[in-house]
Image (tube, grey):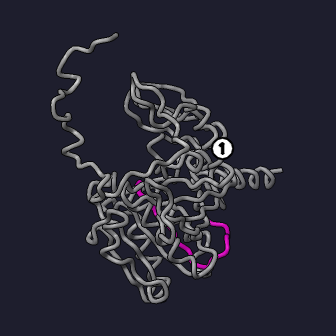
Amino acid sequence: MAMSAVARETVFALRRQIAKIEGTLPERLQLPAGAPLDAGVSADVTSNTDLTIVRRGLAAALPDAFLPTGVERLDAALSGGLPKAALSEIHGGQTRDAGAVAGFALSLTSLILKQAHGLPVLWIGTSEIFGEAGFPYARGLHAAFGIEPGQLLFSEAPRLVDALWVAEEAARMTALAAVILEIRGNPQRLDLTATRRLHARAASAGRPVFLLRQAAEPEPTAAPVRLIVASAPAVPRATITGPLAGSIGRPAFTITIGKSRTALPGQFTLEWNPDERVFDERWGEERRSEERRAGRAKNPVAVVSLPRGRKDPAAASGAILAFPAVGSPDAISPTARDQSPPGERAAHFGPRRAG
């Protein structure tokens, strides 16, 4: 009986520790008076600043705890966006998806730097990773993502164990806006314990840590969110007169939710707008047709209205008249056409008479 109670207490302690690591444990938070709470949680107010958050289905979190992508459907599926103080996985199914994974990570970095007030971002990888996928192009960083080359720091480690050590030390630093760790495959050193350390230090520092994984299979980790990224075909550039044939439009990504706090599956096609530095969702052909039909139903009038006080333009005449060619005897010069014949005066110079 005593052994059964001890075992039960041990199981409860392990469950509590796992819930604490995953961020699903109710905690007492010190918040300023009047601070808003998430709609999905309730609170027992013990004083003006001391709140006991009671979890209701999901972990209690403030709205500012997430990095929204700006795509409404994706943010709703992720319960607000990517967590700011946590480890997030970004997977590429194949080695050729490394460019898409890096581009998506740079897009997220651009969103983070809008709120980071000049803090740099550290990108960590092994010599094998950077030798295979290369480094981001410095001039392209500013043109496509608005990132100054001095804001993106790189750490090239000779071995995976060194890269993990650098990532763990950097994850606790509040002087960095974010930490990016890029790893290839499913190495044994990147086990559940290693990801728990990264997640715990990210939560302690209040900074996001993005784990980029090339050609990796999903496996148990402490990251609450896992996104699978692949490149999507670019559409032609949009102009006033319509799509420009033969052109290449904005970069696009296919995002699949592999793991999230809400456990809601979904696949989205996002386009990165380098001018406004935001994500836009690309709709399928069926959804675009629905949007066009809805737009016509809302706006049944013509796009350009007719001038006020004027009738509709007359229909085109069915007969075509041929005028004498310029220089022929029958042609009348513009000067002679505008003048009255000798001995007569124009009608508008005198009163009009009838009868």
Give coordinates of residue 125: x percent, y percent.
44, 80
- The answer to whether residue 299 is above or below residue 324 is above
Kind of residue sitting beneath label 1:
Glu
Residue 324 visible from this viewpoint = yes
Where, by quadrant of the figure, is residue 325 drawn?
Answer: bottom left
Give coordinates of residue 23: x percent, y percent.
56, 50
Which residue is drawn at the image coordinates 67% and 55% (left, top)?
266
Magenta stretch contains residue 208: yes
Please rate how many residues cluster around mark 1, counting C-alpha atoms within 10 Å: few if below 14, some from 14 to 19, many from 20.
Answer: few
- Judging depth in this view, the residue of 193 and 311 nearest the camera is 311
Magenta stretch contains residue 94: no
- The answer to whether residue 304 is above or below residue 289 is above
- The answer to whether residue 314 is above or below residue 214 is above
Q: Is residue 304 left or right of residue 4?
A: left
For mark 1, what is the residue?
290
Give coordinates of residue 287: x percent, y percent.
65, 48
- The answer to whether residue 199 is above or below residue 4 is below
Mark 1 residue element:
helix
State the quadrant of the C terminus.
top left
- Judging depth in this view, the residue of 266 and 163 nearest the camera is 266
**Farthest-out residue, right:** 1
**Magenta stretch?**
205-221
Figure label count: 1
Which residue is drawn at the image coordinates 53% and 62% (left, top)?
88
Q: Is residue 68 left or right of residue 189?
A: left
- Judging depth in this view, the residue of 351 and 221 nearest the camera is 351
**Farthest-out residue, top:** 355
Give coordinates of residue 59: x percent, y percent.
59, 44
Residue 25 visible from this viewpoint = no
